[in-house]
Amino acid sequence: MRSELPGFRVFLVDEQEVVRRGVAKVLEGDTALEVVGEAGSVSEALRRAPAVRPDVAVVAMRFPDGSGAHLCERLLALFPGLRLLVLSDSMANGLVQAAMRAGASGYLGKHVSGAVLLAAVRSVASGNTVVDGEAAALSGQRADAHGDRLALLACRERAVLRLIGEGLPNREIAERLGLSPKTVKNYVSNLLAKLGLDNRTHAAILATQLRGGPRDGESAA
């Protein structure tokens, strides 16, 4: 039975070949997802990804040395519309936030089942944000504090939030930031999910409340 989703090209990154093979095995049963490449290091990923132009990257690099976050940032610089799902051995709050600030659309522990991983990849590919239940609880501890809510957002998402607060529609935000309307729509969905907001109006209210703080997104424009 064919999936209702359009086809998405998936790129896998992990130091361990056995992990990459395992993820590929999980994804191969879904006709909407095609694994088009893989890499075992940051340099290898940056060299191979441009040739296959993925829609989604499943990044399972270890985070303590910062390589995972660095790779997310580098891949997004190459492909601004890329969706990133991080797999990690650690659910530490700082690592969850580092992944989200680097532009990840999802964060899962490697303990999850194949079914959960597949559902997460499908969801991220469709433009949603997915965070492992344990990681969501940890990151939520910081997000509940008014002054720390922006810590979960990538720089582009902060810029989009600020412009939402100025009352701009997606098309004008796209023009202002040099992005496509579709990419802006994805950023809006991401920031709403990360901040626990129900709709764009709530985002505009929050942006207005935070307007007095530093404009983190300006440097990203």
Image (cartoon, helix red, strand yellow):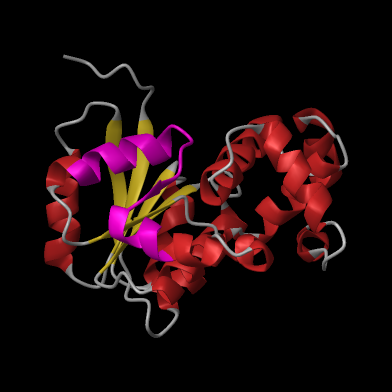
Q: In this view, which residue lies farthest toward the bottom?
A: 65
In the displayed structure, 126 sits above or below 112; it is above
In the displayed structure, 68 sits above or below 153; it is below
In the displayed structure, 218 sits above or below 183; it is below
- Report the side of 221 relative to 3 (left or right): right
- The foreground one among 11 and 149 is 149
**Quadrant location, the C terminus:** bottom right
In the rendered image, residue 95 lying in the magenta stretch gets the answer no
- The foreground one among 115 and 83 is 115
List x then y, in percent, for residue 171: 79, 29
Q: Label the magenta part by its dominant secondary structure.
A: helix
In the rendered image, residue 127 lying in the magenta stretch gets the answer yes
List x then y, in percent, for residue 144: 55, 60
Q: Residue at x 60, y 47 (%)?
A: 191
Q: Residue at x 85, y 34 (%)?
A: 168
List x then y, in percent, for residue 59: 35, 61
Q: Residue at x 38, y 33 (%)?
A: 8
Question: Which residues, given as a range, are shown in magenta?
Answer: 116-138
Query: Do we see residue 102 in this rendering?
Result: no
- Report the side of 116 relative to 181 (left or right): left
Image quadrant assignment for residue 151: bottom right
Count every numbered label the image shows and give the total.
0
Image quadrant assignment for residue 125: top left
Q: Residue at x 40, y 85 (%)?
A: 65
Query: Do we see residue 113 in this rendering?
Result: yes
List x then y, in percent, for residue 188: 64, 39
**Quadrant location, the N terminus:** top left
